[in-house]
Image (cartoon, rainbow, N blue to C red):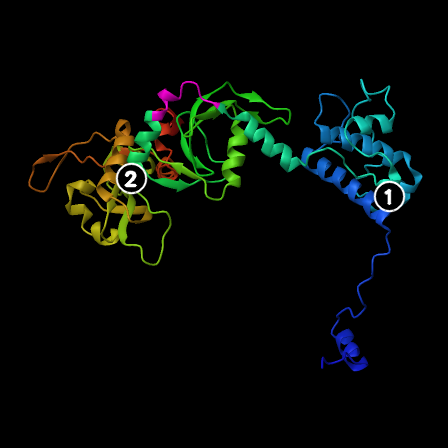
Amino acid sequence: MPKQTTDEDLELLSELGLDTEPDPVSQRSAREEQIIAGFEEIERFVEEQGRLPQHGEDRDIFERIYAVRLDRLRNSEECRVILEPLDSRGLLDAEANTALPSEADLDDEALLASLGVDADLENGITHLTHVRSRQEIKAAEEIAQRTSCQDFNKFKPIFSQVQRDLEMGARQTLKYQDNAAVNKGDLFILDGQKVLVADMGEPFISDYGRSDRRLRVIYDNATESDLLLRSLQRALNKDKTSRRITNPDLGPLFSQGEAEDDVQTGYIYVLRSLSDDPFIAENRSVIHKIGVTGDDVKKRVANAKKDSTYLLADVEIVATFKLSNINRTKLEALLHKFFDNARLDVELKDRFGIPVQPREWFFVPLSAIEEVIEKIQAGTLHQFRYDLETARLTQS
């Protein structure tokens, strides 16, 4: 039999600072709960949009409903009594952003009826009839946006080649990062389908003050859509299994995340020379050696001053990046190729007097090297180039 809570138990709990009073039972009627629920929907709209709901035929149907509902709540003494203690934003007294336009000749009941809303407060101010939920409307819009791709024959070979590349390991898929860059030619997996960004319109500023672009998106089932850039990003964010398909030039360089059974395959290392050469000393902060090794980096550079590869001088290790399950040779070649226009042109004589030209030193700041590594991990390096004049990455 369950133990009963005694007066001594309550006293002890009280001494410990715990509230022993029973939770108050809500005394609100169903009608009051409906009025509050309707007001909370308006509050959510204001929080998301940063403004009051407005009237107008050009407005979203739900915004028009919220605008009319707010008017009715403001004009109802009964509703104000219920809501004023809960109105932390002052919505009941805030001035509307716009006057009622073409809907002005309709009274509240007629307007609500035209929107599919039951205007009878006795039946509930929040009751909607013949109005789909936001989720239903959004899903319908997504379906409606897709149309048959009339020139799919141009894109079918691309999808076929991408599938072959994935099977052969020439491409890989990476987890899509929230709101990551989307560019023309990018490939993704969204809701189990391969997606190609075939074209991008001119940038414009949306109604909410954000930059956006209209896209032409091709799906591997021979359909297409004209999604907005931000809509595609939201869809990729929402789909927890969405992936970015990498460019074939990158190949399978990085693992998808370090696991206990990963094979440790090395490091990217960045070195700075401690040479007394006047040119190197003057530009020491932007001259770096970039390499990839499977050995311990400290051991590798222990005898740097005897090796022309290290400019016959001691070096400082300024950064290392741990790698797992990568092709070291391919990764190093990719890094050197990307920074080829910044390669340091220097000739030294080794300890035997033979002239040598070290090829792994670059006139590039550490920040640019770190950014390149991030782009490789994201599978987007092919979208950028290194600008020697600005010492920064720019979109190609």
CA gap, disc 1 to disc 2? 63 Å
The residue furthest right is 77
Residue appearing at x 43%, y 18% in the figure: 150
Would you say 5 lies left or right of 396 here? right
- Name the quadrant containing residue 199: top left
Position of residue 97 measured from the top left corner of the image (x, y, whole percent): 78, 26
Magenta part of the chain: 148-156
Asked which quadrant contains residue 296, the reply is bottom left
The numbered disc on residue 258 is: none
The residue identified by callout 1 is 84
304 or 154: nearer the viewer: 154
For the question of whether residue 40 can be seen, the reply is yes
Mark 1: amino acid: Glu
Q: Return the residue found at the far front.
A: 130
Circle 2 is placed at which residue position?
Answer: 167
Q: Residue at x 82, y 22 (%)?
A: 100
Q: Secondary structure at mark 1?
A: helix
User: Which SS class for mark 2?
Assistant: helix
- Where is residue 77? Give x, y as percent: 93, 39
Q: Are circles 1 and 2 on residues that touch, CB within 8 Å?
A: no
The percent position of residue 124, horizontal first and vertical second, equals: 83, 41
Q: Earlier in the sequence, mark 1 or mark 2?
A: 1
What amino acid is found at the position of numbered circle 2 in the picture?
Answer: Glu
Q: Is residue 83 left or right of residue 176?
A: right
Quadrant the C terminus occupies: top left
